Structures are given as structure tokens and as C-alpha cells.
Amino acid sequence: MKRALIVGINHYTKAPLKGCIKDAEKINNVLANHQDGSPNFDCKLMTSSEQAKYPITTAKLKKNISNLFLQEADIAVLYFSGHGATNSIGSYLVTQNAERYNEGVSLQEIITMANNSKVKEAIIILDACHSGHMGNPLELGNRKVILREGVSILASSRDTQYSVERNGSGLFTAIVYEAMSGGASDLLGNITVAGMYYFADQLLNSWEQRPVFKTHVSKMFSLRQCTPKVPVAILRRLIIYFETKEQMLQLNPLYEISIAPKHEVFEKIMAHLRLFQTNGLLTPVGTTSMYDAAKESKHCKLTPLGMFYWDLVYKKQL
């Protein structure tokens, strides 16, 4: 079972925002289904409204976060887009009834709920100013804040920074959405929180906004499945084309479709080899071009990444 609580707050009395509801809806849409349309997360979407009758109060948000982590699940995701606040006591997700010294839901409380939950993998994604403060070691008497195994936090900015909005949407959320749509997928199409962080880290400005990633996990769970970059059936042919992972494969002109005479078997193998090269699994020896390697009867060999996947296939883990 996989559950997600997705929160977007635009309607603040003193400092309203514009893109948080839109951001929450985007994350809800991308998490609810895998890329092929099959069901993924059981999502609950909470968004603010101009109607004061139904505000997202501190009590309401805290209750829903508690319910998210209360029941057993394989993965539980909390996503929040809205204001963040920090003071001498700690940091908070700001709610609609916020006031000084009662800013919203304490980030420390959220960590505690995640740490105490029976969820195998608890993932907290925050697009809020000062959200990077979440999970920093804070002294509480003689105790320090720690993350138990299975808890990860991905925040849009460091504790001294503001999260940027562009084109009516949070820049960080736009990147997370692109990452979950396939930008951060591995060769098998898996999207993990670590892959999302790496994707965001490469795209965000090094001076204005830096993402924060804090985790304590022994295994990365897939948040979403996208189309594999290399189909598993083709990956499994690594041990057919290379008897050992250190072996080099001798090419010849028959592999190249543009060189006569034609040979369908070798040309099909070359199509697989080019796919391996495109995804960093293979490299030609003595040249940068697979065409030249075939034309000149040179070799190709597996890269360290290719050797890793060769091992997975050989050990029947793939």
C-alpha cells in the first residue's frame, strides 16, 4: 500500500501565494498513476480556499499528517507547498490560521511522527521557504533530532533561503514534477527520492536556491514507474553478448546497417549495442563511434555501469 498527503496553500491573510495549489495538483496527478496509467499512490489532496469556513488550520493539517503516518504502509509521502517559517525555536509549515509564536505545524513534530510510524518508507517533500531547516540536528535537552531508518526529507531550499516561484509555479516543484515524469528515472524506469534530488541538484541555481536531501535508508524504494530506458529483455542479453563482464566484443562491418552486405542478426545486435552505449553501459575501444568501430573491426567493452548491470543479470536479480 502506498499513500500520499498532498497539501497546497495559496490563501494566507497577510502574504497570499499564487502557485501552491497548482503545484499540489501537479504532484497529485503524477503520483496517482504510473506512466503507463496503472494505479500508484492513494492520494489525498488538501488545498486552501478563499472560503474562511474551510481553512487549513494547524490542527487540521497536523491531524492529516498524523493519519498519513499512523497506519502501516510500504510508502507514505507528505508533500507541502506553501509558506515556511523559522524562528529561534524551530521551523514550521505555515497554516492559514498562523500567528506569531503559533506559526503552524512544527517540522520537529513531523519528524517525530515519521520516526514513530510503522510505514516502511516515509518521504517528506517540501516546497516552502526555510524548509531546509527540517531534520537539522537540534538540541532538545540532551536529545538530538535524528531520522530513523526509512525516513527521507527532500526540501526546496536551505534554512536561510527563499523558494523561488516562476511562471505561477514553484521552481522546485516544477523540477520535481519533471523528475517524476521520467527525467529522474533509472535504466529500468524507477523513480527514487535520491534520483529526484540528483535531478533537482543539477538544475537549481547554486547561489539563490539549493535543495536539501536528508535520508536514512538501507534500500531505495521506487516512487513511480516510467518507461524503461532499456527494456529488461534487452538488458538480459548483456550476458549473451559478453560471456564475462571484462570481455571485449569484436565488431566487424556486418554489424553496421549502412555497410553492405546486409546481415540481419548482426544488425539487430548492433541496435542493442547502440542502446547500451546511449545509456552509458558500453563504449567502443579506440574510437568514439560505434560506426567506426564496426567499419574498422574494432572492439567494444562494458563500462563500470554496464558491468554493474551485467552482474545483476548474471545473478538473476534482473
Image: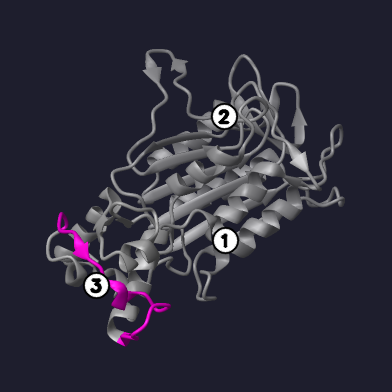
State the residue position of label 3: 237
The foreground one among 194 and 123 is 194
Is most of the magenta stretch helix, strand or loop? loop
Measure how far apart labels 3 and 2 are at the Cα level: 44 Å
State the residue position of label 2: 132
Extent of the magenta region: 245-264
The foreground one among 289 and 81 is 289
| Number of the label disc, if any, that sits on residue 181 | 1
Q: Amino acid at mark 2?
A: Gly
Picture coordinates of residue 274 (x, y %)? Answer: 38, 66
Residue 101 against residue 97 in the figure, above or below: above
Cβ atoms at labels 1 and 2 below 8 Å apart: no
Check if residue 307 falls in the magenta segment: no
Cβ atoms at labels 3 and 2 below 8 Å apart: no
Question: Can you tell which quarter of the image residue 144 is in?
Answer: top left
Q: Looking at the image, which residue is at 50% across and 76% down? A: 38
Picture coordinates of residue 37 (x, y %)? Answer: 54, 76
Q: Looking at the image, which residue is at 65% across and 18% down? A: 87
Binning the other alpha carbons within 10 Å of mark 2 as few (below 14), some (14 to 19) or many (20 upward) gives many
SS at badge 1? helix
Residue 173 against residue 75 in the figure, above or below: above
